[in-house]
Image (cartoon, rainbow, N blue to C red):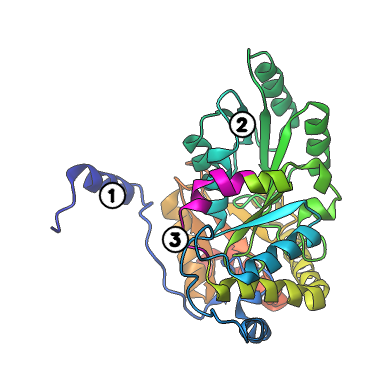
Amino acid sequence: MEKLPKKLQSKLSARKEKGSLRHLPWQGKSIDFSSNDYLGLAKSEKIAQMTHDFLEGSAQKNGSSGSRLLSGNHQLYARLEDFMASHHNSGAALVFNSGYDANIGFFSSVPQRGDMVLYDELVHASIRDGIQMGNAKSYKFAHNDIDDLARHVERSRNRDGLEEIYVVTESVFSMDGDSPDLRHLAHFCRDNGCLLVVDEAHATGIYGNGRDLVAEQGLEQEVFARIITFGKAMGCHGAALLGSESLKEYLVNFSRSFIYTTALPPHTVATILAAYEYLGDEGKAVSGQLRANIGHFKQEMERLQMTDRFIKSDSAIQCTLIRGNDKVKAIAKQLQTAGFDVKPILSPTVKEGEERLRFCLHAFNTKEEITKVLVLLNNPINL
């Protein structure tokens, strides 16, 4: 049967009319300003060889053969989770198949009926989806606004029978590239009896000597749970929840996205271990190069008098707002034609009127590439 139901077709037609219909892009040979491979580890031949070495002598090299609660809990899992608990200074770690799985698994099962989840209005869709799947009430607070959060906490405390308040944020926001004042937020949660949850997806491996931003700021004991992902700066795949041993035990028993899925194969887990080992040897150098490139990007923005066009960010994610799906796609197309892989971020991924070009910076980008792409962006008619 080839015919699509009318309601589905109408939704596709509406997307086309708004210029927001998504397509799967081909990966070409353009200069990379779009991937999450911030440190260049996804292309590392050394990590590939280290992964092979981890698997030598292992009886299981391909599929995991089942969920972790059945036959898929191969020996590399214990090695990785023990390492992560020590490396990230956490009571325990539990590996999930992806950041999306980790977030829906946590937020759908941990906050209970009678609890409240207060989340930053710009948190990732996976967090929102997980919250919607759960039984707790939830409200968003203004982006990085602790005063607004305080008002929500006070209002929530006045509710009869409310047991726990979970406060949710990201250490580096994926669409703006900015960060909350984590220290202030952690102290606020401690003083008000709230449980702080931080998604570290875009900070994992970059901050804190190959750890995360919470660890860099020494706030590990102030945070109830951290989501660590491997598919970005770590150059691998998968994710982990960091928290107490009791939280890990709870998730193993009640997190449906953990229980009812085939485990990651040994090769994937070995790659994660290899990436951590690589960062232990070369992490300072490669993260230092990334920081240098971020600094050069910001210097060139200032030199070209473009600073006011970009959202303030000190991370590898730098965004310039270009209102309208059609306009931002047209400018992105010009940059792509010139050989730069820069992606437009369209509504409804972001709010209408906040469409943007997102520049993802990497340790392997050259200063010349950074300067040239900004010059071209500043003079799009010359492309």
**Count of numbered labels shown in the rendering:** 3
Quadrant location of the N terminus in the rendered image: bottom left
Q: Residue at x 57, y 65 (%)?
A: 73
Q: Is 246 or 381 nearer to us in this picture? A: 246
Gap between marks 2 and 3, in whole Å?
Answer: 39 Å
Q: How dense is the environment of label 2, judged by Cα within 10 Å: few (below 14), some, or many (20 and up)?
A: many
Dot 2 and dot 3 residues touching (CB under 8 Å): no
Going from the N terminus, do you reach mark 1 or mark 2 first?
1
Q: From this viewpoint, is residue 341 visible?
A: yes
What secondary structure is marked by label 2? strand
Gap between marks 1 and 2, in whole Å?
Answer: 33 Å
Check residue 12 in the rendering and tell me which mark sits there, or answer none: 1
- The residue that disc 2 covers is 117
Q: Position of residue 257 (x, y in %)?
A: 50, 50
What secondary structure is marked by label 1? helix
Check residue 330 in the rendering and tell me which mark sits there, or answer none: 3
Gap between marks 3 and 1, in whole Å?
Answer: 21 Å
Dot 1 amino acid type:
Leu
Dot 2 amino acid type:
Val
Which of the two discs, 2 and 3, sits closer to the camera? 2
Q: From this viewpoint, is residue 124 visible?
A: no
Dot 3 amino acid type:
Ala
What residue span does the magenta drawing correspond to?
A: 250-263
Which quarter of the picture shows residue 111?
top right
Q: Is residue 297 above or below residue 306?
A: below
Main structural element of the magenta stretch: helix, strand or loop?
Answer: helix
Q: Position of residue 251 (x, y in %)?
A: 60, 46
Q: Residue furthest front?
A: 70
Going from the N terminus, do you reach mark 3 or mark 1 first?
1
Which of the two discs, 1 and 2, sits closer to the camera? 2
Q: Is 145 or 90 nearer to us in this picture? A: 90
